[in-house]
Amino acid sequence: FWHTIFVIITFAVVARGVQGGIEKASRIMIPLLFLMLIILLIYASQSGGFHQALHFLFSIDAAKINSHVIIVAVGQAFFSLALGAGCILIYGAYLKGESNSTMPVIVIAIASIVVATLAGVAVISFAYASHLLLAEGPGLMFITLPNAFSKMPNGQWLESAFFILLVFAAWTSTISLAEPLVAYLVNHWKMTRHLACIIIGIIVWSLGIIVALSFNVWKNFKLFHAWSLFYTVTYVSTNILLPLGGLFLSLFAGWVLYPRNKNYHDRNFSFRIWLVVIRYIVPIALLLIIFQAVSSAVK
């Protein structure tokens, strides 16, 4: 039921377009998200686990930095910024030709790091304050944290605020992920935006139901005798498909898009540096990451 409601409100916003729907919704949700995050962080700083959380997050153990850690970190960066999924690309396509994209890119990257860091400090502070073991993924979000909140004064209000924050974060992300798919159907298949939203919405809803059932009805169904449906979708999309999408985008930008506009950019030194990076360095790095991710999956 809640999955259905969430899909409906997501595509209701996307159906109104970038300015009429996505921009208006983001102007409301993003400031609220920041406000609620700051409130949780202030409370976390008084929870008793704040200093332990800081040590856990920011102490460095060089011996533990290996290829797997790097892959997970890059996968998280791709997932956080939706690189390889077309979100940044599609929003950039709506900018005016004379717009300077440098500052928005810097702001987006910094904001993503700040929000992730603040959320990590708050969440792990609550876990330490309640003397609970740190889980990973859904275990931390839906088991460890509710247990932590239940042991705190006014914990039910904090828990409500936290999960409302989580809904806002997920909502802004799903809106961004839906827009490239809808825009593709509108521009290439000449569909109306509402029809495109209905088609993509049904597909998303169906895939979401499969993943949701992997926690209950289909929890014993394992791919390769080990992977749940949820883990399969999470690992493949984050660690393989997003870097693969980034690889295709970098190859397209460097080898297909540039020749069509080379006269315009020939005198721009910074663009030449970017061209070398996007043509050679980025594809090689992403190929190594994808290869390592596939190797880890096979093992």
Image (tube, rainbow, N blue to C red):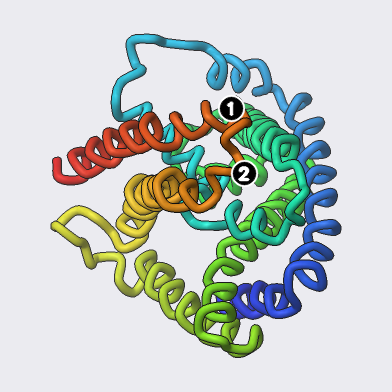
Closer-to-camera residue (222/49): 222
The tag on residue 128 is: 1
- The x, y position of residue 149, in whole percent, is 66, 43
Name the one closer to the observer, 150 or 288.
288
Q: Report, in whole angstroms, how far the alpha carbon at label 2 lies from the one at label 1.
A: 55 Å
Q: Residues within 10 Å of mark 1 (few under 14, many from 20)?
A: many
Measured from the top left, where is residue 94 in percent x and y?
A: 70, 61
Q: Is residue 137 left or right of residue 264?
A: left
Q: Is residue 249 above or below residue 295?
A: below
Q: Residue furthest front?
A: 263
> Which quadrant holds the N terminus?
bottom right
Dot 2 crowding, Cα within 10 Å, few <14, some 14–19, many 20+: few
Mark with earlier residue (2, 1): 1
Report which quarter residue 6 is drawn in. bottom right
At x 48%, y 11%, the residue is 60
Q: In the drawing, does residue 226 fall left or right of residue 12?
A: left
The number of callouts visible is 2
Q: Please, is residue 217 above or below residue 47 in the view?
A: below
Which residue type carries mark 1?
Answer: Tyr
> Residue, x 38% and y 51% (percent of image)?
248
Query: Which residue occupies the foreground of this view, 184 or 5?
Result: 184
Query: Label 2 belongs to which residue?
Result: 264
Q: Is residue 109 left or right of residue 96?
A: left
Badge 2 amino acid: Tyr
Residue depicted at x 22% and y 39%:
291
Mark 2 or 1: the one toward you:
2
Labels 2 and 1 touching (C-beta < 8 A) = no
> Of 202 and 63, which appears nearest the observer?
202
Q: Could you tell me which secondary element the residue under label 1 belongs to?
A: helix
**Residue at coordinates 82% horizontally, 72% vertically from top-left?**
20
Which of the numbered marks, if any, corresponds to residue 46?
none
Q: Quadrant of the C terminus?
A: top left
